[in-house]
Amino acid sequence: MVQKAKILLVDDRPENLLALEAILSALDQTLVRAASGEEALKALLTDDFAVILLDVQMPGMDGFETAAHIKRRERTRDIPIIFLTAINHGPHHTFRGYAAGAVDYISKPFDPWVLRAKVSVFVELYMKNCQLREQAALLRLQLEQGAAPGVNGAKEPAGLLAELSARLAAVEEQAEALSKQLDESADAAAVATAAHLERKLTGLRRALDALEPGTGEGRVRFPSQD
């Protein structure tokens, strides 16, 4: 069962963190504070996050350096980062943000509705990815254990495949609706993330189809869940 997504808020000013919490509270997700780049990296060692809101100007380790560390770690390199900054040094400054791995770069003061909408897209993509991993893990476990029909409540293979196929179809339907919504918003980073999700869904669907009677024998190679 997918739990609430975690959103990491990184800013050295408590009042800014409070403002972000007020804006994002309507999403009903888990908001985690970090008052420095170092604190953010510690939080990322133990928790998974749907998206990171990262202030650029911080004493010590600034946002660019923090993002560089995040992108170097295999565990965290794919987490979307939205940079928040109160200054604007022109195109070069913005380019540095994207070069550091940001999916978006927002100048303060920002429109609360726009920020909430952008974050909600990445939260929804994260939830869909979690659902996909759960379906793949369930199928892999059942196949590797070779669950015998009727033992410990195990289902007949055909029944198990039908149930997994139905669950996957529900995720596919939600992903398709989300992709149509993103096509209208023209947010390139979110569209690319959604396309990656669709490719993984397609790979899992092919794996399920290959298990249907009469489609061949042998072990199925599951799509990567990275």
Image (tube, rainbow, N blue to C red):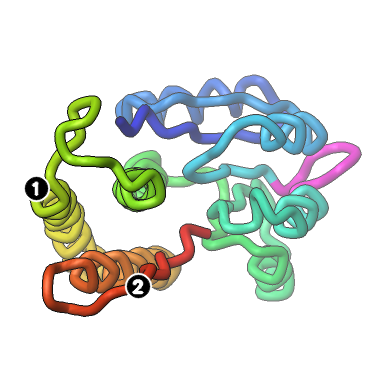
Q: Position of residue 49 (x, y in %)?
A: 53, 39
Residue 80: which numbered mark, if any?
Answer: none
Q: Amino acid at mark 2?
A: Gly
Of the pair 50 and 143, the residue shown nearer to us: 143
Q: Position of residue 108 (x, y in %)?
A: 56, 46
Residue depicted at 13% across the width and 57% down the height: 169
Residue 126 visible in the picture: no
For mark 2, give the secondary structure. loop
Q: Quadrant of the N terminus?
A: top left
Residue depicted at 28% across the width and 75% down the height: 217
Magenta stretch encompasses residue 150? no
Magenta stretch encompasses residue 62? yes
Q: Is residue 60 left or right of residue 152?
A: right
Of the pair 1 and 9, the residue shown nearer to us: 1
Q: Position of residue 161 (x, y in %)?
A: 15, 54
Q: Height in image: 216 above or below 80? A: below
Of the pair 182 and 215, the residue shown nearer to us: 215
Q: Amino acid at mark 1?
A: Gly
Q: Height in image: 142 above or below 10? A: below
Which residue lies under the disc numbered 1? 159
Which residue lies under the disc numbered 2? 218
Q: What segment carries the magenta color? A: 56-63
Q: CA distance from mark 1 to mark 2?
A: 20 Å
Q: Is residue 155 left or right of residue 147?
A: left
Residue 113 visible in the picture: yes
Of the pair 8 and 15, the residue shown nearer to us: 8
Q: Are marks 1 and 2 in contact (CB under 8 Å)?
A: no
Name the image quarter holding residue 115. Answer: top left
For mark 1, give the secondary structure. helix
Name the image quarter holding residue 195. Answer: bottom left
